[in-house]
Image (cartoon, helix red, strand yellow):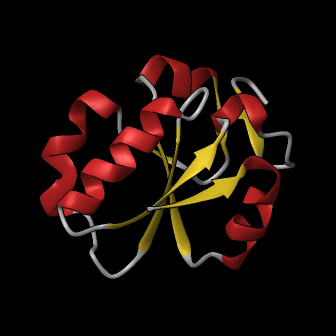
Amino acid sequence: MDTVFANDLDLYIEKRQYRLVDVRSREEYERIHITGAINIPYEELESWYSKLNRNIQYILYCERGTTSLGAAREMEDHGLKTKSVLGGLAAYSGRYLTRFGE
């Protein structure tokens, strides 16, 4: 399983060849997330395996990178292509950050 440096994430977002997934809770996602990311809380991930497209690459992130790394491994075990953001949202300082109310 590959990883993505948080500082390089904007390049991946701009390519639009990847689907960005936030695996934090809905409440955390609603407070702050990366624009364009879908929210699939880690606890609900298993119910999504059959709904996700196996032909695209998913880039996962969480707050610090640990949960998304585990989630990416689990998704790969189910035949999905994944990458995980090293350091998670805490390490991201790109231009696609969306805060509640902005």
Q: Residue furthest front?
A: 1
Quadrant the C terminus occupies? top right
- Residue 10 left/right relative to 100: right
- Can residue 23 be seen here? no
Q: Is residue 33 above or below residue 20?
A: above
Quadrant the N terminus occupies? bottom left
State the residue in front, 13 or 88: 88
Image spot of residue 19 (x, y percent): 49, 64
| Residue 10 image-quadrant placement | bottom right
Q: Is residue 12 above or below residue 62?
A: below
What residue is at 72 percent from the left and 28 percent from the top?
A: 90
**Count of numbered marks:** 0
State the residue in front, 64 or 13: 64
What residue is at 20 percent from the left and 59 percent from the top?
A: 77
- Can residue 70 be seen here? yes
- Residue 45 left/right relative to 24: left
- Residue 15 left/right relative to 59: right
| Residue 4 image-quadrant placement | bottom right
Image spot of residue 69 (x, y percent): 45, 43
Image spot of residue 72 (x, y percent): 38, 51
Q: Is residue 43 above or below residue 2?
A: above
- Residue 14 left/right relative to 51: right
What residue is at 54 percent from the left and 70 percent from the top?
A: 18
| Residue 99 image-quadrant placement | top right
What residue is at 61 percent from the left and 28 percent from the top?
A: 64
